[in-house]
Image (cartoon, rainbow, N blue to C red):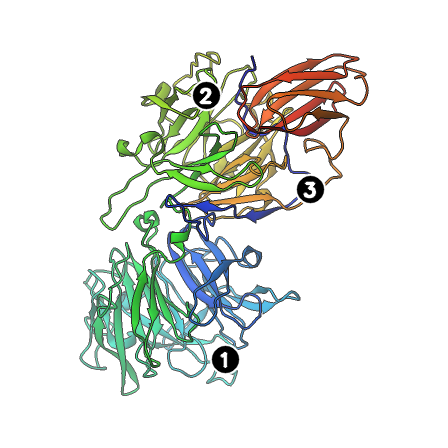
Amino acid sequence: MHKLLLLPLLLFAGLSFGQTVEPWLPPVINSNGDTLIYGALGGLNTPQYSELDLNNDGKMDLLVYDRSGQIALTFLNEGGPNEINYKYAPKYQKNFPQGTRNFMLARDFNCDGIADLFFFNQPPFTSGGIGVYKGRYNADNELEFDLYNPLLEYTHPQFGVSDIFIFNPDVPAIEDIDFDGDLDIAAFTLDFTFQRNVYYYRNTSMDDGHGCDSLNFVLEHECHGMFSESGFDNTALLSPGVDSCAGNPYWGRMANPRHIGSTVTLVDWNADRKMDLLMGDVSVNTLNMLTAEIVNDTFLFVSQDTTYPSYDVPVNVFSYPAGYFVDVDNDGDKDMIASPTELATGEAVTDSVSWLYLNNSPDSTMQLEFQQKDFMVGQMIDLGMGSFPTIVDVNADGLLDLVVGHFAYTDTFNVFSTSLHYYENVGTATAPVFQLMDEDFAGLASLGEQSFVPAFGDIDGDGDQDLLVGLVDGTLDLIENTAGANQAMIWGNRTDSFAGIDAGSVAYPQLMDLDRDGDLDLVVGNDIGRMYYYENDGDANTPDFPSSPSSNAFGFDLTAYGGSLAAPHFVDLGTDFELFLGHDDGKILQFNNIDGNVTGLYDTLSLDFMGFWQGRNSSIAVADLDGDGERDFVLGNIRGGISFYRPSYVDTTTSHNVLAQSSSFSLFPNPNQGEFVVKWEAPLEAGGQLFLFDLMGRLIEQQQLVQGQQYSSFQLTDLPAGQYLLQYRSKTGQQEVQKLIIR
């Protein structure tokens, strides 16, 4: 009888020295059977949209910057006239600055036909403002950027030169306000006298004789359009004329509510060469379009549409909306995409974060018509706020499936809910396809909790995988799998507050035999960057975990690396463990020197493993998903989706722990139905061991080998069909792996 022992993922596989990885988009299918175009793209919470030409082909492509994830995503425009067709193009993404905060907008400030980037930047000892990257094309016609100005400045007529200040929550408008050919800026400011007014920073590049290739700003007006925020919603206080700033006596300290956050977009919707202003506000779901006139050379907003576009379906984004104007359908005019900006509730919205309006005006004015609430994001796995993937064979068919937890999602009624999502591999062991089969896996949604972080392991020694779920309060729930070995999971009793463990805010658990004593131990990370080790004092059949950690400061303290949130994932390499650690800055940390040193100090291999970047709050799972003997990676992030990476090549100069290109032993028959023979080319000069693993790295069978042995047989007819890996380890340290197929 073979024994199924959970080992934490892939003793057999490893990335060889010099190997790289590449983004991978295995097919993802929703519950209706529709293939998602951007299924494994990681989700969107607070997207911002800009046009730019990524590959210098003269066609405007799309930049999507997600504010909560702090990630820039790139898409090639493959649509024809009046057609919407954007293809994800990660090869260009690597050329963009990642990890920038608050906003990133593509504009061409120097009129060279190449997009530049305006982004929020806060160098040391500054209040924060606008930085600029200058665009250029490399020899391969890929758009790249060089830092042009870390912080834009302006000249005040009374106080001299200062930084152009941008409130942390705000998104400024960067357009040619006065139609003179250079880019100007409109934004709310820090000035307490004008804290609810928009500053107009005029670019004097053209006036100074520089053409449009410079960014030299003066404060043109402290109350652009002569309006003020109401301070309570997105309604504007309009002035009856240009001799007063509505609701604000010039230079008088205001007693009204302060500015708390706004998005500002400039667009000439009525084609009268006067830039109108579209405004969104914190805790407001609608947009307000302010229409401009020019009176005595001064901009004056004369009317407002507080539920824009009121003539169609008004924007109702939850919450703090912004509008972005790009030509989505390639018809030559600007369409509008509205999306949330709030870095709290808005991050948990799933199906209404990207409202698309097409411009169907017969002339150069703008007439918007609502199309959908989920442009692009509706074609992705998106579970709202946060995602925590795990890899496990749920239905015992020999293929690896996905179970994904998340923090929460909500709708426009601010009702939060959390559940586990099960994506079955309906493809093959070499070409996985993941289909959503259950949006409430294990039936946990009714608990009304937030943050479900799943972990699997045979905690009671009955041959099946039980489920441990980390919760937002730091406790764990255990759900027993009663199916038995090699059976589809069946859920039995649930144990609240398992073992009395409380790891603090948000628990990130993993089960593995870290001390190699034959039973599963427990590691739990938390939201403040700590990991706790709970040694199993029982055995493989009767676990006994202490309520207090056996060690509460082992391996490292993540806060020393400048981050919080510790999402651990240990991988067993046979002779040592590796730890891959997700955390809040989005990078993956890599450690080893763990075997026999569980509570000691680990060695840091990488502070940015493989350059993975899918946005903030990373988590990771590892397994061989495509049957090539190399480990693949599934990443979670704050955006609520998942992303895949796989090796882009194999360095065959290093054969340790990879599938053997040639081997001293052979398998026959292969494929088979569980009965097969292993033969060596010659009798073994020394003994050794054979290990049979499934693709999750779980040990299925182990055989001892003796000197002079040349054959070894296996009878495993009860194993489910699928791919397995047979590893030979000689007493001299040689390791070889071959693939086994059971039908």
SS assignment at label 1: loop
In three-dimensional space, the C-alpha distance between marks 2 and 1, rounded to whole angstroms, equals 67 Å
Q: Label 1: few (<14), some or many (≥20) within 10 Å?
A: many
- Residue in the image at 69% along x and 40% along y: 17
Q: Position of residue 365 (x, y in %)?
A: 32, 79
Disc 1 marks a residue whose amino acid type is: Cys
Disc 2 marks a residue whose amino acid type is: Asp
SS assignment at label 2: loop
In three-dimensional space, the C-alpha distance between marks 3 and 1, rounded to whole angstroms, equals 49 Å
Residue at which label 1 appears: 212
Q: Earlier in the sequence, mark 3 or mark 1?
A: 1
Question: Where residue 464 is drawn, which disc sits there?
Answer: 2
Of circles 2 and 1, the one toward us is 2
Q: Earlier in the sequence, mark 2 or mark 1?
A: 1
366 vs 191, nearest the viewer: 366
- Residue in the image at 57% along x and 20% along y: 700
304 versus 568 height, above or below: below
Question: Where residue 704 is drawn, which disc sits there?
Answer: none
Q: Quadrant of residue 503?
A: top left
448 versus 214 height, above or below: above
Number of numbered discs overlaid on the protein picture: 3
Horizontal side, residue 732 vs residue 282: left or right: right
62 vs 481, nearest the viewer: 481
Q: Position of residue 393 (x, y in %)?
A: 48, 30
Q: Position of residue 285 (x, y in %)?
A: 25, 58
Residue at which label 3 appears: 650
Of circles 3 and 1, the one toward us is 3
Asked if the residue under mark 1 is in contact with the one under mark 3, i.e. CB atoms within 8 Å, the reply is no
Q: Position of residue 118 (x, y in %)?
A: 46, 65
